[in-house]
Image (tube, rainbow, N blue to C red):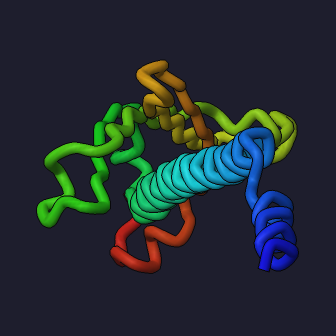
């Protein structure tokens, strides 16, 4: 019986974990858990930036399409503000606020020597918004340009040349 107790006693010593083994395991699990949390946070940040950028593109396209339907006499410079909160039911209670302006200038890409140059203008839509990354403001800007003709699409839609 003494021999079997001695073997059991030696077997118990070799099957136990040491403090160093436990510390290494905790370090490895902590590193994996921390990396997972950082990856998850980074993924949500990228998703939020992508949403805001896509919404900015939608706002600019909305303005450009509306401008293409304006008559020549209605083309003018103006500013606007839109807000977007994907979690709000009214879509105007918070979230990112987009500030924009529309500038109507002469079409610089068309040479002055062509006969239709006075009947063309360039419309530029600028959009700016701010989001916060760890309470640090990050300003984003986007720009979209198009050209509008005096005798263009709007005359076919509204049926009158102005």
Q: Say whether residue 146 is visible.
A: no
From this view, report whether residue 90 is shown above or below residue 130.
Answer: below
Number of marks in picture: 0
Q: Is residue 41 left or right of residue 146?
A: left
From this view, report whether residue 103 is shown above or below residue 120.
Answer: above
Return the residue found at the far front: 1
Task: Choose between 87 and 42: the one closer to the eye.
Answer: 42
Residue 82 sits in which quadrant? top left
Q: Tell me residue 140's x, y (percent).
A: 56, 32
Residue 11 sits in which quadrant? bottom right
Q: Say whether residue 71 is visible.
A: yes
Return the residue found at the far top: 136
Q: Is residue 40 left or right of residue 8?
A: left
Q: Tell me residue 34's x, y (percent).
A: 63, 45
Question: What residue sits 85% from the left and 38% below the top?
Answer: 111
Question: What residue sits 58% from the left and 55% below the top?
Answer: 40
Question: What residue sits 35% from the left and 70% below the top?
Answer: 160
Task: Choose between 110 and 98: the one closer to the eye.
Answer: 98
Q: Tell me residue 141's x, y (percent).
A: 57, 33
Quarter of the picture holding the N terminus: bottom right
Quarter of the picture holding the C terminus: bottom left
Task: Choose between 21 and 71: the one closer to the eye.
Answer: 21
Q: Is residue 106 left or right of residue 47?
A: right
Question: What residue sits 19% from the left and 60% below the top?
Answer: 88
């Amino acid at each position: 019986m003494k021999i079997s107790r001695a073997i059991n006693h030696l077997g118990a010593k070799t099957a136990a974990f040491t403090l160093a083994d436990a510390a290494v395991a905790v370090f490895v699990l902590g590193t994996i858990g921390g990396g997972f949390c950082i990856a998850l946070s980074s993924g949500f940040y990228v998703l939020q930036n992508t949403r805001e950028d896509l919404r900015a593109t939608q706002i600019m396209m909305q303005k450009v399409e509306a401008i293409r339907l304006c008559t020549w006499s209605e083309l003018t410079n103006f500013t606007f503000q839109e807000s977007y909160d994907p979690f709000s039911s009214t879509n105007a209670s918070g979230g990112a606020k987009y500030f924009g302006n529309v500038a109507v200038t002469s079409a610089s890409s068309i040479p002055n020597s062509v006969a239709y140059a006075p009947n063309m203008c360039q419309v530029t839509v600028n959009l700016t918004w701010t989001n916060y990354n760890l309470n640090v403001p990050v300003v984003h800007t986007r720009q979209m340009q198009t050209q509008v003709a005096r005798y263009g699409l709007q005359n076919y839609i509204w049926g009158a040349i102005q």
